[in-house]
Image (tube, helix red, strand yellow):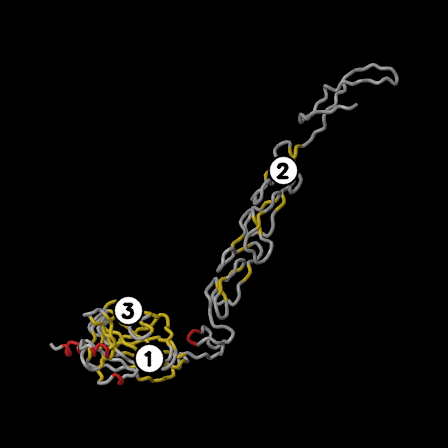
Amino acid sequence: MSRLRAISILFAAFVATFMLQISVASAAVVETIDIPVDTLYLSANYFMQTFTPAQSGYVTQITLQSDYTNGPGELIIYEGAGPGTVIGSQSVNWLGTGAEVVTFASSLPVTAGNVYTIQPTNVNLRGIWSSTMDAYPGSELWILNTDTNTWLAWPDCAATNWCASGYPHMAVQIVIEVPIDSDGDGVNDYEDAFPNDPTRAVSCEPGFYGAFTCQPAPVGTYVPTAGALVATPCPVGRFSDVEGAVACQPAQPGYFVDFVGAAAPIACSPGTYQSNSGQNSCTLADPGYFVATAAAIAQTACPAGYTSAAGAIECYRINTAPTAVPGGPYLAAVNETILLDGSASTDPEGDTLTESW
């Protein structure tokens, strides 16, 4: 088999004529770049193809003509001619049965007049031969020179006598959606969650809020549902100490929150306690009880012989009056001073007594 013939069963076609259509469903101009299908075959992993959009927009779909191959692969788009910077890719499960539509999970922005390159992997393709390079403007096939393991544009490849004569192209259709802004809010319809509402363009997930960009709920606030425009402050008794909260936490026992929008609970001070969660105040220790530390969840009863006032941090001993025993009997004349013996006096708590008669 001649080299010309061997190469000719490897190639496919690409169309660089531009057609503008109006898509009513998306309310966007769609530019399609088409190249018809002929009998040219392109072997897997040896070819890539350039295209030049006439309008700036987003690549959303690419249709290729697969042939006799199936299984997992990838469709890669590079910026510039040939293998350059990857601007996007999409995993594909090739069927090998003809026209296969690849829809990109994320639309890829392209600029009018700039050159881009598509590279399908792990799939045989079909295309078309043309007699001149200008048959499909803006389109150029690149081929992998297996002798040097380098990629060559077809004219360069042909000049080396490594490739056959003529101009092959992949059979491909590239759909570029040219966005419009129906509500005039500065966001293209393609990216606008509310294309007819100029006051908003995004629908944020729970925990986030905003009209045009999504921001996490600040600490002290929460967003329980999707599509919120503002975050809601946490109510009294609750707090949020993280960004992006979908709910506020109740103040735990021993703590309280007495204002709206709290980022942290407040510990009950000594002399007070809180047994329950989600409260907006603490409870004073009852008379006869005390709370010695902060963040207490219960009060403690004073021990026997001790007591306290409300809100006490400690108890004090109950003081019973001492029993005075002056001694005697004593005999004395009128106006005579008597020295009493109080050594028999007692105090119930065992305190030291000072005697004065």
Q: Amino acid at mark 1?
A: Thr
Image spot of residue 191 (x, y percent): 43, 73
- Residue 299's place in the image compared with 224, above or below, is above
Q: Which residue is mark 1?
A: 52
**Element under label 1?**
loop
Q: Which residue is mark 2?
A: 314
Give the crowd class for mark 2: few <14, some 14-19, many >=20 residues within 10 Å. some
Q: Quadrant of the C terminus?
A: top right
Left or right: residue 26 compared with residue 349: left
Image spot of residue 207 (x, y percent): 48, 62
Q: Amino acid at mark 3?
A: Glu
Q: Nearer the viewer, mark 3 or mark 1?
A: 1
Image spot of residue 123 (x, y percent): 23, 71
- Residue 88's place in the image compared with 341, above or below, is below
- Identify the residue at image location x=64%, y=38%: 288
- Identify the residue at image location x=67%, y=27%: 349
Q: Nearer the viewer, mark 3 or mark 2?
A: 3
Asked whether 344 or 31 is in front, the reply is 31
Disc 3 from disc 2: Cα separation: 75 Å
